[in-house]
Amino acid sequence: MKSLAVWTVKGGVGKTTAAVNLAHAAASDGLRTVLWDLDPQGAASFYLRIPPSLEGAVDAVTRRSVSLAELARATEFANLAMLPADFAFRHLDLALDAAGKPRKRLAAKLDDLATRFDLAVLDCPPSVSLVSEAVVKTVDAVLVPVIPSTLSMRTLHQVRAFVAEHGRGAEVLPFLSMVDRRKRMHTELALACLADPAFLTTAIPSASVVEKMGLTRAPVAATLPSQPAARAFTALWHEIRARLGL
Amino acid sequence: MPRYLTPPDLDDAAAAAILAPVGALVLGPPEPLTVTYLDTFDWRLHEAGLMLVEELGVECRLCLLDGSREPYLSPAAATPTTADSLPPGHLAERVGPVLGIRALLPVGAARVVRRDGRIEDPRGDLLARIRLEQLTVVDERGVPAGEPRPTFWTDGREAAAAVAAVPGVSPVPNHDLEAVAATRDRRPGDYSSKLRIRLDPAERADRALRAILLELLGTLEANVEGAVADHDTEFVHDLRVACRRSRSALTQVKGVLEPALAGPANAELKWLGGVTNPLRDLDVYLLEMPVYRTLVPPEAAAELAPLEALLRRSRRRAHRSVVRALRSDRFTRFATGWRAALTDGEPSPAPEAARPVAEVAGERIARAHRRILKHGRGLGDDPPAEALHRLRIDAKKLRYLLEFFASLYPDDEVGARVKELKGLQDILGGFNDMHVQSEHLGELAEQLRAEPAVGAGCLLALGRLSAALEARQEGFRLAFHDAFADFASKPVRRAFARLAGEREEP
């Protein structure tokens, strides 16, 4: 099983929509995929209509005796299961700290998920915390959404520095998110980003269909597969798949 | 969660009303599909608890049901026919090893109009998944073979209970394998290359032998169509095994059927075996090609390409000969006449015919066992290939007898004896394969030498391969003594004597 964290320290950059749409694209591509919503806001769970009622959600992360794979819920989409968020995740840092050895605990949880899944996509909270530290130490790759703006690009530098310091070989895969081609600055900065060979070449456009996910509560490819945004997520997934060697 | 057969007049509004106490029903658009169930001729997926269904709509996808909570779905560029053509990933890992060298074939099909949906709570959260289908089983030509059947599936307990309580609703299995296979006169598990006959120890030996031969004729005939169509190499293999088993039954259990019946049948079975020999040999070489490549250095492996090409050309010719034989009047006459003779209820006048089969079986097993011990013990330190070949045939005859009469003995007894014998057979078979293959390789090298496009590199690679096969043959020869000593050991001799009903071991 490969594990992929979607993470950045800046909010509102399309992190959760990327996690949901990429997990759906991977599942449609034939990978048994689990989307793990670690963000206490539970937006990914909301998008897939899975109520955040994972009983003992924190225990499931911190205790070895609880099987995470068994708690995964089926979604409406083939090959895609979900571990929904819980509001209690806001205390996950404290719980992980109290339990000790957070990286080992998380690695054991991913090993457990590997018994049922080919890919785990972790939607992480947009913060620097013990949880994010454990995640970057454990996963195979960290996917970083970057809006072509100076602030968002500055954030990428921070993420890279954090992963360089704490990561254990996780690949950082930045990609352009919410790109508005009508904005000159977006176009110019996007071109500058793509000069960086680490960047994935597919850019996710700023699109109303993505914003409407809050209403449709489904990945864009499930409701409007021919829309450019849906096609972009599929193309981005294929790039990630190749980079992960899947 | 079970699936239910619902009344034909259950429309969206009626379904929504039934499910209203649980939550709001939201249905997606209808999706027309052709679903085709795939399995090997010998039902390997079914036997392994797997089910593979191709769903062809706007896209083509493969659905795998393996008894776990969720079906697995994979996009597919084309219908897979072999393990190699399965989409990589979970499907190839799960299904590939089960298929082995057997081909995937359609075992039945249906046309489906599917609507997926959900039941949601007032907040729009998912309560249960729903699937409504109109399923029409179709025959091989795609013509409907029955009325459309409306079905309802859900993974929600409350939703299932609400639907189950509706008058006229009845639970049905979660798949339609039996229904679709029936249109092709197939039943899951209806074919196995293993003999599955059950005999009564007290029945007349001629009746029992006829039943065994009839079963073998059934296996032989069942493989004709697949051997002609050349779906995979196992059809011809199984057909040949049925042929050899039949001959063994006729020659090893003499004095039970009248010679006027057994003699001509044996001659025809010998002809059929001979006519399929070249094809089977070539199949074995081609199946062994991946191993051959590992037996020579990597640079020489690439030089084996002309050998493979020659084998494939020869195989095409050999297959055409087999097709001619299987479509010949001679074969039809034999199969029809043999079946009629075996089903003829007249008791055989042969001297052993009226004896109880258990008695005859014990004698024949004991005799075949003694023959192996006698021939094996006579071999010196460096047994010649011909002697090992004879011993291999002796061992095979005993194996067939054990298989014919297995139902007369306790399962674990026969199983244990077969295992002991198999240890010896593996060594003898391995020795013979290497011997035959390295000798035949010399003939093939001669043929290749005559081809202008074949360079010295290929001939050199063949030389290396031949040397490697001879080295392996020598390895089997060295292992023979230990394998025979195990088989001829006192406990094994005693066990065989016990099985055959003898007082003392040979």
Image (cartoon, rainbow, N blue to C red):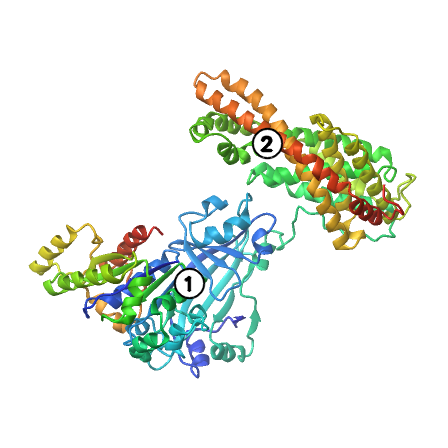
Instruction: Write down the quadrant of residue A87 in the picture.
Output: bottom left
Task: Return the x and y of residue A74 as percentages of the image width and height.
Answer: 41, 69
Q: Furthest-bottom residue in view?
A: B21
Figure disc tally: 2
Chain for disc number 1? A
Could you say which is closer to the camera, residue A26 or residue B130?
Answer: A26
Discs 2, 1: same chain: no
Q: Is residue B324 visible?
A: no
Chain for disc number 2? B
The kind of residue on which mark 1 rests is Asp
Q: Please state if B454 lies on the left or on the right of A89 as rendered.
A: right
Could you say which is closer to the camera, residue B47 or residue B228?
Answer: B47
Q: Is residue A93 visible?
A: yes
Asked if residue B380 is positioned above or below residue B4 in the image, the reply reads above
Determine the secondary structure under disc 2: helix
Q: Please state if B398 lies on the left or on the right of A109 as rendered.
A: right
Instruction: Write down the quadrant of residue A178 in the picture.
Output: bottom left
The quarter of the image holding the C terminus of chain B is: top right
Asked if residue B320 is positioned above or below residue A136 in the image, the reply reads above
Determine the secondary structure under disc 1: helix
Could you say which is closer to the camera, residue B5 or residue B318?
Answer: B318
Q: Which residue is mark 1?
A: A111
The kind of residue on which mark 2 rests is Arg
Task: Return the x and y of residue A2 as percentages of the image width and height.
Answer: 36, 58
Task: Return the x and y of residue B140 as percentages of the image width and height.
Answer: 54, 49
Asked if residue B257 is positioned above or below residue B385 in the image, the reply reads below
Q: Which residue is mark 2?
A: B472
